[in-house]
Image (cartoon, rainbow, N blue to C red):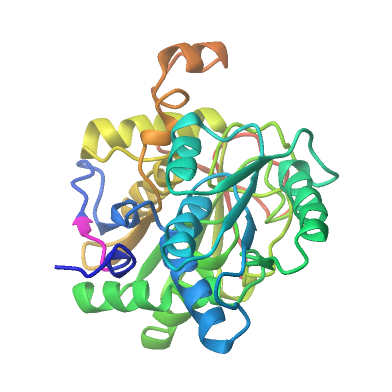
Amino acid sequence: MYENMIEMIGNTPLVKLKLDEQSSAGVFAKLEMQNPFGMKDRVAKKAIMKAKESGELREGQPIFESSSGTMACGIALVGTALGHPVHIVTDPRLDSITKAKLHSLGCEVHVVEKMGEQGWQGGRLDLLRELLKSYPDGYWLRQYDNPANPEAYTELAHELIDELGQVDVLVAAVGSGGSISGTARELKRYNPACKVIAVDATGSVIFGQPDRPARLQGGIGNSLVAGNVDFSLIDEVHWLNDHEAFAATINLAKNEKIFAGNSSGSVYAVARWISTQLSQDVKIAAIFPDRGDRYAETIYSTDYRHMNGMSSTEFLYRPVEVKKHTVVENWSYAPLL
């Protein structure tokens, strides 16, 4: 029994995927979606508690952050539970389910009206800075460069080690950079040979692709390069386009009975393919960040997919290898180290 909802964060289930007859290495899905709201509950808890312990965040001080989804819910949960007003700056892509969650938890939601120079993220940050002028005592959590973000995933790495003994390959999506960097750093302390594979969206600038702010994927990719992305830890990057990410997500639900968001679907696609390239004794850990409920009207909507030219959910689990700075349109991968 937990004393409160904050204590529930962490210790998420690990599930071995069944995959298919072409797979060889074992893939173990870390179901971060089983946190109260999703993976970034860990970051909200770590960052807020650390700031309170240091005195940087005072009692009752309002908390501000830019987010399009799971980070917002994590901050809403932890911040309001500890007596802090929470202000979330988001954009029109915010789905109705997440918006309802935020309002029900007592958040104030501010929606930016237009993109900035760095897409929706840039527009959100511009509005956030303007709001802080009206709230001079506001505390900005700064998920993109707050070291508490990657630090929050040290526990996740230890959970993997406790259950698997050794992780040979880590597959994780990249947005703010915290989950892949924090988990990889700790896993490499125990197994320096652990291979780290990043999963990104086409049209995301993190690994040198041109920005396409109109991409449909949520919870993965970025229009800016966050300070928490530690490129020295990452061996390889895979990019998937919207159609591939959506199709993989639908296949994840159908084949593995895991109802997840597109970041999990993309990670599933990459981990499933990696498993065909390695031997049976290799252990692949794949991080699945969030549940599929917020995508009910997009990824899981036949009408939405048809409207966006995605009538087929067929998916070939076969990427193309390219050089690091090649501009890609379809599932491609490139070595980084």
Residue 312 makes an appearance in the image: yes
Residue 193 shows in the view: no
Q: Which residue lies at the image location 39% right of the left edge and 48% below the top edge?
A: 290
Vertical relation: 44 (above or below) 245: below
Q: Nearer the viewer, residue 86 or 181?
A: 86
Up the image or down, 203 lies above or below 288; here it is: above
Report the magenta stretch's main SS.
loop
Q: Is residue 206 left or right of residue 259?
A: right
Residue 56, image quadrant? bottom right
Left/right placement of residue 69 relative to residue 15 reads right
Occupied quadrant, residue 30: bottom left
In the picture as drawn, the residue positioned furthest to the left comes out as: 1
Where in the figure is residue 222, as x and y percent of width and height? 66, 49
Residue in front for this viewpoint, 129 or 261: 129
Residue at 32% over, 32% down: 251
Q: Position of residue 134 (x, y in %)?
A: 80, 57
Confirm whether the magenta stretch covers residue 13: yes
125 left or right of 196 in image: right
Q: How many marks?
A: 0
Q: Is residue 165 left or right of residue 150?
A: left
The residue sitting at 78% across, 44% down in the picture is 123
Percent across and percent down for residue 143 are 61, 64
| Depth check, front residue: 181 or 136 | 136
| Magenta residue span | 11-15
Location of the N terminus by quadrant is bottom left
Quadrant assignment for the C terminus: bottom right
Q: Magenta segment: does it hold 166?
A: no
What x and y, as percent, mark residue 270?
42, 48
Q: Nearer the viewer, residue 19 or 164?
A: 164
